[in-house]
Image (tube, helix red, strand yellow):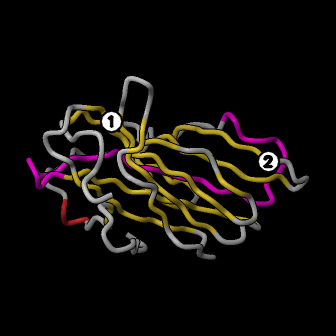
Amino acid sequence: MATAAVLGFGTSVSVAAPAALDDAKPANSYVMVDGHRVVAGTTIGEWGKTKGGKSYSFTYTAGETKSGAPAAAAAARCSVYISDVSFHGSGASAWFQWETSQACSGSFGSQKLQTQMWRSSWSGPRGYNDWHGTGLTSNSFIDYGWSTDCNDGGGTYTYYPVMQGYASGIGWGPKTRSDNELRKGCGTRSPNP
């Protein structure tokens, strides 16, 4: 991972070490998105401003044509990617893990991102933990790993992470979710949010 996320004391979200993966996954095919390797078929969110100052936002699938791209050239743009969520461990020692990336170009200013685990409910998606984010940076690419604990035994729900990117020269992008979701017995709230 290119950068490490540092979060406040007492939070249940933390940086995930690549070595923490419990199970091996089958080989994926990759494509290049904004000069970075992404799993083919992943949903990518893009937003920006044209040279005429018009804002735009759309999603597309990595490896396919950007069908929602504006005809006018972009003065600034950002793309976000959120990996599939995985589940590790068992019982009180279980956790969710995912990765977020953002690439910006043009006059984007400074960028940051935020992420949150969501869960199902009868009235629609709800936050399972609080939003956690990064500080502003002028780097054109940021990549962070995240994890949040499973509150074992508190009820079975469907869980998936979401992310949202920000660039000072463009504003906030759309919320983008992982392409997968997991059905687990982790309750309604992550411990120590």
Which residue is painted at 49% across and 50% down in the image? 163
In this rendering, position of residue 145 left or right of residue 72: left
Q: Amino acid at mark 2?
A: Ser
Q: Is residue 178 depicted above or below 36 in this figure?
A: above
Report the span colored magenta: 67-94
Mark 1 sits on what residue?
181
- Would you identify the image quadrant in which residue 171 lies? bottom right
Look at the image and say whether residue 79 sits in the magenta stretch. yes
Which residue is painted at 69% across and 43% down in the image? 57
User: Quarter of the image containing the C terminus?
Assistant: bottom left
Look at the image and say whether residue 91 sits in the magenta stretch. yes
Q: Amino acid at mark 1?
A: Glu
- Which secondary structure, mark 2? strand
User: Quarter of the image containing the N terminus?
Assistant: bottom left
Q: Is residue 112 depicted above or below 58 in this figure?
A: below
- The one nearer the camera, 129 or 136, is 129
- Which secondary structure, mark 1? loop
Categorize mark 2 by other alpha carbons within 10 Å: few (<14), some (14-19), many (20+).
Answer: some
- The one nearer the camera, 63 or 118, is 118
Mark 2 sits on what residue?
55
Which residue is painted at 14% across and 50% down in the image? 23
Give the alpha-carbon distance from disc 2 to disc 1, as whole Å.
30 Å
* Residue 176 visible here: yes
Q: Is residue 35 depicted above or below 40 in this figure?
A: below
